[in-house]
């Protein structure tokens, strides 16, 4: 079996990721593995991807009442991408230390937070028919394929009518690439697409993030339903 696939079958796959994140500082740089400087470009790309779906110009218009930030960390995506576009945002994150830091990091934006949920996505069940957008960024490589399919199926149930799941993740050229530092896998577009399809999700929109440093992975955004 290829290393990446094998890594997900190890009993320690989740524990090793947890140990990694436990020793990371609750800062933007910590969230981005030392690449804090790309946060603004990332946010711009995400807003350009998301905004047209919330406006009339997109044929399948999405509501802007409530979003969920998955693997939210200290709330970097919530603060800069989701709070400017949604009335309320909930955060789900497995590391309590990051959630503890979130209100101070979000500052005034904290008043628009619904819930801070401390839970691994492999176990998390969103409230049914609750969210216009479920945003998953730089976290899905921490789930095994089986858990990711099941997580997406639960997310589908958590969408309001017209809602979408958005995925923004690193993309490998081929197959699975295992990162033993944080115990995650990077999947190719082909592997991710297979998982979307197993979960019964259709890709409504797909874009590649531009202007990131050349030495990092290609990053893609998908809107799914
Ligand atoms: C690379 S950081 C990204 C944080 C945030 N999405 C961002 O873009 O700023 C990954 C985050 O996922 C969290 N995480 C790792 N494994 C997780 C899991 N199984 N369930 C939920 N969160 C997880 C980590 O604690 C960390 O906060």
Image (spheres, helix red, strand yellow):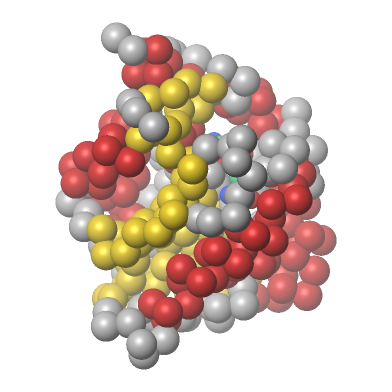
Where residue 89 sits in the image (x, y, percent)? 56, 69
Residue at horizontal 69 percent and vertical 61 percent from the top? 40
- Residue found farthest to the top: 1
Left or right of residue 97: residue 198: left
Quadrant of the rendered image containing residue 21 = top right
Quadrant of the rendered image containing residue 133 = bottom left
Residue at horizontal 40 percent and vertical 12 percent from the top? 3
Left or right of residue 30: residue 9: left
Where residue 111 sits in the image (x, y, percent)? 71, 75
Residue at horizontal 66 percent and vertical 67 percent from the top? 80
Where residue 139 sits in the image (x, y, percent)? 51, 41
Which quarter of the rendered image does ligand 1 occupy?
Answer: top right
Where residue 25 sits in the image (x, y, percent)? 79, 38
Left or right of residue 122: residue 129: left
- Residue found farthest to the bottom: 56
- Residue found farthest to the front: 214
The residue lying toward the viewer, choosing from 35 and 108, is 35
Position above or below: 39 against 24:
below
The residue lying toward the viewer, choosing from 207 and 123, is 207
């Amino acid at each position: 079996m290829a290393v990446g696939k094998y890594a997900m079958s190890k009993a320690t796959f989740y524990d090793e990721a947890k140990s990694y994140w436990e020793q990371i500082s609750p800062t933007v740089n910590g969230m981005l593995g030392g690449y804090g400087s790309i946060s603004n470009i990332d946010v711009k790309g995400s807003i350009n991807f998301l905004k047209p779906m919330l406006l009339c110009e997109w044929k399948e218009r999405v509501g802007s009442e409530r979003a969920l930030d998955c693997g939210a960390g200290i709330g970097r995506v919530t603060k800069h991408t989701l709070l400017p576009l949604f009335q309320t945002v909930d955060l789900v994150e497995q590391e309590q230390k990051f959630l503890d830091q979130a209100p101070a990091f979000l500052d005034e934006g904290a008043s628009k937070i619904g819930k801070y949920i401390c839970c691994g996505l492999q176990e998390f069940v969103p409230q049914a028919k609750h969210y216009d957008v479920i945003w998953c960024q730089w976290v899905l490589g921490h789930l095994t394929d089986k858990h990711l399919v099941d997580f997406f199926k639960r997310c589908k149930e958590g969408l309001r009518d017209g809602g979408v799941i958005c995925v923004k993740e690193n993309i490998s050229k081929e197959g699975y690439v295992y990162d033993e530092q944080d115990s995650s896998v990077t999947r190719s577009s082909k592997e991710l697409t297979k998982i979307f399809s197993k979960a019964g999700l259709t890709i409504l929109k797909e874009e590649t993030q531009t202007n990131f440093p050349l030495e990092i992975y290609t990053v893609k955004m998908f809107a799914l339903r």
